[in-house]
Image (cartoon, rainbow, N blue to C red):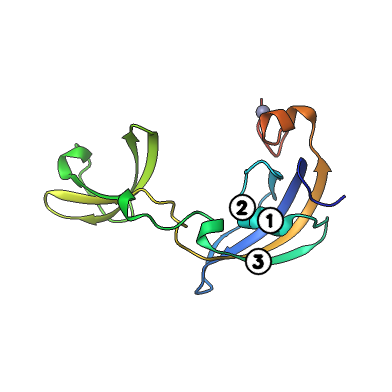
Amino acid sequence: MSIKANAVVAIHYAVKDEEGAQLDSSEGKEPLTYLHGANNIIPGLEKALEGKAEGDQVEVTVAPEEGYGEHREELVEAVPREAFGDVDQLEPGMRFQAQTDKGPVSVVVTDVQEDTVTVDGNHPLAGKSLNFSVKVDSVRDATEEEISHGHVHGPEGQEH
Ligand code: ZN
C-alpha cells in the first residue's frame, strides 16, 4: 500500500544540516514509526512521504518553516545567575527544563556571565534546512484506536 492519511509508516532515515554534518540517524536502531497525517513528524517530511510505498527511497530538503520553525529571538533570554541555585559549573551547552506559564520548556545555556546566564528555548534544529535521506521500511493501515489516539500503538509505538 502507499502512504496516505491513517497509514502507520516505518522509516529508516538520516538527516544532515546544510554543511553536510549528520545530525541524527536511525542506523543500527529500530525504524522510526509514525502515524501519517497526524502531525507526528515535521510537515516537510510528511509531505515528501505522501504516496510513497515500502522500499521507496526519498531525498528531501526541508526548510525551517516546514521543519522545526525559524529561530525565534524572543526565546533567547538572559536570566539571573541565582535562577540556577546550586548548580556549580554552568557551561554553554547544558540543558535545563525551565518552568514557564506554558508548561516546561527545554532550554540550552548559550552564554554564562558573572550575574546573568543566557538560555535559548528554541528547538535545537530551529532555523536549519534539513537534508533527509529516507527509506520506507513498511506501511500498514492504522487501527481505529490508533487513529482516535493520533499515534501508533504496539512495540514500535505507545505502550498503553
Ligand atoms: Zn494511544
Q: In this view, does 149 lie to the left or right of 100?
A: right
Query: Which residue is drawn at the image coordinates 61% and 52% (left, top)?
Result: 43
Sequence-wise, the earlier of marks 2 and 3 is: 2
Q: How crowded is mark 1: few (under 14 residues within 10 Å), some or many (20 or more)?
A: some
Query: Which residue is drawn at the image coordinates 72% and 35% (left, top)?
Result: 155
2 and 1 marks in contact (CB < 8 Å): yes
3 and 1 marks in contact (CB < 8 Å): no
- Up the image or down, 11 lies above or below 35; here it is below
User: Ligand 1 appears in which quadrant?
Assistant: top right
Q: Give the residue furthest to the left.
A: 114
Q: Nearer the viewer, mark 3 or mark 1?
A: 1
Rendered image: mark on residue 47: 1
Helix, strand or loop at disc 2?
Answer: helix
Q: Give the residue furthest to the top.
A: 160
Image coords of residue 22 (percent x, y): 54, 66
Q: How crowded is mark 2: few (under 14 residues within 10 Å), some or many (20 or more)?
A: some
Report, in whole angstroms, how far the alpha carbon at label 2 lies from the one at label 3: 12 Å
Observer able to see residue 74: yes
Q: In this view, does 104 lie to the left or right of 63?
A: left
Helix, strand or loop at disc 3?
Answer: strand
Amino acid type at image mark 1: Lys
Of 86 and 8, the residue lying toward us: 8
Amino acid type at image mark 3: Val
Report, in whole angstroms, how far the alpha carbon at label 3 lies from the one at label 1: 10 Å
Of 1 and 26, the residue lying toward us: 1
Query: Which quarter of the figure has residue 151?
Result: top right
Q: Disc 3 designates what residue?
A: 60
Q: Give the residue furthest to the bottom.
A: 19
Q: Disc 2 designates what residue?
A: 43
Image coords of residue 152 (percent x, y): 70, 36
Helix, strand or loop at disc 1?
Answer: helix
